[in-house]
Each structure stands twice: as C-alpha cells, then as structure tokens.
Image (cartoon, rainbow, N blue to C red):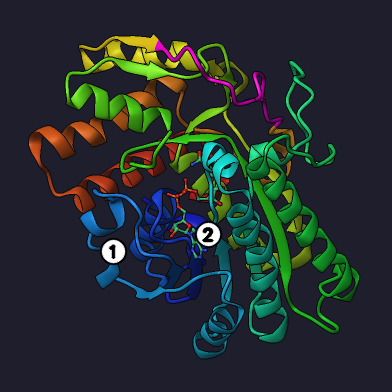
Amino acid sequence: MSKPFKNTYENIRILITGHTGFKGSWLTTWLTYLGADVIGYALKPSTEPNMFEKLGLGKKITNIIGDVRDEKHLNKVFTKYQPEIVFHLAAQPLVKQSYEEPKLTYETNVMGTVNLLEAVRTNGNVKSVVNITSDKCYENKEWVYGYRENDPMGGYDPYSSSKGCSELITSAYRNSFFNPDNYGKIHNTVLATVRAGNVIGGGDWSKDRIITDCINALNNNETICIRNPKATRPWQHVLEPLSGYLWLGALMYNHGVEYSGAWNFGPKEEDINTVESMVKKINKFWGTGDYTVEKDNQQHEAELLKLDISKSNYYLNWKPVYAFDDALKITLDWYRNYYITESDMLAQTIEQINNYTKQAEENGLKWTD
Ligand SMILES: NC(=O)c1ccc[n+]([C@@H]2O[C@H](COP(=O)([O-])OP(=O)(O)OC[C@H]3O[C@@H](n4cnc5c(N)ncnc54)[C@H](O)[C@@H]3O)[C@@H](O)[C@H]2O)c1
C-alpha cells in the first residue's frame, strides 16, 4: 500500500481540538498511525465508556485538557507547540443539548472558534486550519436536493446556528486577516471549513445519538426508542469525512490558497436514508432488536437534509468509499468486537482504517496515491 495523503503528515506537528471526542479519537488514531506529532486540546472525555481512553490515545500524543473558551490557555498552547496544521473539532455538538444549554453552545462553538482563530493569528506558524462545522450550518429549506457550499448559512436551533456562525467567523477572518490575495506576502495561512453529514462508526457513546441509543438498547435487550422516524439524514461512516479533512489539510499544506474556502463531505445521494430505515437495518444486521417511536417529541428537527458533494468530487477527487449498508455493518462490527469478543480496540480501529484505505485505493481515489 502506498503512503496516503502524499505522506504529508509524517513527523508534522498537528493540533486537534476536540481530540477526546468520537471523531477526534478516530482522527487522532489515524494521524498517529500516519506518524504525525499530535497535540490534542479538549475537555476530558464526557462519556463512560469512551473511545479515547479505551484506545489508550492519551499515551500516544501530547494530551492537553483545556477549554476553547479559555483564550489565554489556548494561545499559550499555540505559542509553546507551534503546530503547522490545525483541525478544529471541539464543540458542543448535540442539537438536543443546545436547546437545554444555548449559552454554553454559543460560548463553545462561536467564541471557541474566535479564540482558535485569534491563536492562529497571533502565532504565525500555522499553515492550514480545517474548521469542522456541520451540514446543519445551512439555512434549511427542506429542499429535496443537496446544499451547495455557496448556499446561505442559517440554523433553526442553537446548535445549527452556532455552526453557521462558526462558518461566518472563519470567512470573516479569511477576508480580514488571511486574505488569499495576500498569501505568501503578508501571511502563510490557509483557512477552510468542512461540512459533513451525520457520522456513524464504532466508539460513539454520546447521548441522544441514534447509534448510541441502538447499541445500548441491543446490548441490554431493550426496545430502541426513536424520536423522528421520517427524518432523512446524510449518514456516513466516520472515516469518510475524516479522509476528506485529511486530504484537504494535506492539499492546503502543500499547495496553499487554491484549497481555501468551504467543502462538503457527504454521502452518495442513494445513501441518504430515514432514521427508521436505518434502525430497521441495524436490527437486521445485529440479528435481533425492535423499536418504538417517542410520542412527546416537541423539539423542532429538520426533516430533509442533504449535501451536494460535486465540489469535493471535482476539485479534490474525493468520494465516499462505503455504501450505507457497509458503513452500518462496519460500525456494528466495532461494537460487537468491543462488547462480545472484548478485542484490542486500538488494533481493531487501525484495521478498519487500513481496510478503508485499501478500498479507497481500489476505487482509484487520489488521496491514496
Ligand atoms: N458526529 C456527527 O455526526 C457530526 C456531524 C457533523 C459535524 N460534527 C462536528 O464534528 C465535531 C466533533 O463531533 P463529535 O461527534 O466527535 O462530538 P463529541 O461530543 O464526541 O466530541 C466533542 C469534543 O469537543 C470537546 N469539547 C467540547 N466542549 C469543549 C470546550 N469548551 N473546550 C474544549 N473542548 C471541548 C470535547 O471534549 C470532545 O473532545 C464537532 O465540531 C461537531 O459539531 C459532528
């Protein structure tokens, strides 16, 4: 197998915010496997169990427990470690919690982004920043077609709008302080934002996420309770958007402003499914299980949400690798290995990364060249 991402990450100093979370743990595993020198900055893991501790990732990186709302601490970390590439994942990422704690959500997701970009601005060493926002950053019009990168930002609930704000902040910093016209003259930093769909994969134990709810119910022989059966979501395996973030980060690092801006990393059109059809498949692939629908769900949630991935496809030669059923099966395999065979989960996770990379290579994706 060739070295993916043009071998960009070997021995490079990378800062990941939110490394103790679900996506952050997968990204940390992948980057350390690629030979990167990873600095993680996040709160302690908030669930028990959690992937970060189960994989022993704290021992593989410089693990800093810190708050993105703490501007001074974050700035000190940048000054001390001088990262070259930054992946910003730290966020309050749950819609339901954002209804309960809107202020915390905005402080973390909005001011956290400002604090991060201020740290980048005052420490000149950073070459690429990939800010992970969400498919929910778009003003949702319940369209049947996918949102494109230049569609307006919006967000009905505090979480979604905080991610729209994070996008607008990044865009303002790009115009004002890291303008592409001044690249190589008065700065050397490229800013991008990335919008992925609803991510599934092993190792997610966050509250109010459908996979976590299903796995907990199946593991305890209980009935799965779903809130919004008809809602369609752009489901994808966690490795899909991560391959996009890593490829984009490498291209920005090696080629500069050509790759700045916003990028969607969603699933294929045919893999956009309703919550109910996903739960039915989970029961089928697990081999047991049943579900009911919660009756008193009062909170607004978007019904239709799709991402148009033509831009990433055309300019980055990025494409999803797994079909929906395969993504689900791989996710369930991870949990089966965890709960039933009690395997070495770091080895299992690396094996899933290798299998994914092999499949991407067979599909001819440029990031594997
Ligand atoms: N999981 C998904 O389906 C999905 C979809 C689209 C976008 N996203 C985005 O991806 C990112 C990661 O999501 P996830 O699913 O891994 O969530 P997660 O809850 O598992 O992880 C969140 C991470 O952010 C950190 N964090 C939270 N508040 C913080 C603070 N004040 N200071 C420092 N760190 C803080 C947590 O410690 C954790 O490491 C988020 O920005 C989220 O909005 C996730």
Q: Residues within 10 Å of mark 2 (few under 14, many from 20)?
A: many
Q: Is residue 221 above or below residue 350?
A: above
Q: Would residue 276 be counted in the magenta stretch?
A: no
**Does the beta carbon at disc 2 come under 8 Å from ligand 1?**
yes
Q: Which residue is mark 2?
A: 90
Residue pushed farthest bottom?
Answer: 80
Q: Residue 341's image quarter?
A: top left
> Disc 2 marks which amino acid?
Ala
Q: CA distance from mark 2 to mark 1?
A: 17 Å
- Residue closest to the eye, 27 or 136: 136
Q: Earlier in the sequence, mark 2 or mark 1?
A: 1
Residue under the point 24% across and 30% down? 333
Q: Residue 359's image quarter?
A: top left
The local secondary structure at tag 1 comes to: helix
The image position of residue 351, as x and y in percent, is 26, 45
The image position of residue 132, as x and y in percent, is 60, 53
Q: Is residue 70 above or below residue 289?
A: below
Give the residues in magenta: 293-308
Q: Is residue 121 above or below residue 48?
A: below
> Disc 1 marks which amino acid?
Leu
The image position of residue 197, as x and y in percent, is 58, 35
Q: How many marks?
A: 2
39 with respect to 148 (left or right)? left
- Residue closest to the eye, 301 or 218: 301
Q: Residue 75's image quarter?
A: bottom right
Residue under the point 37% across and 69% down? 35
Q: Which residue is mark 1?
A: 57
Residue under the point 43% across and 18% down? 226
359 with respect to 315 (left or right)? left
The local secondary structure at tag 2 comes to: loop
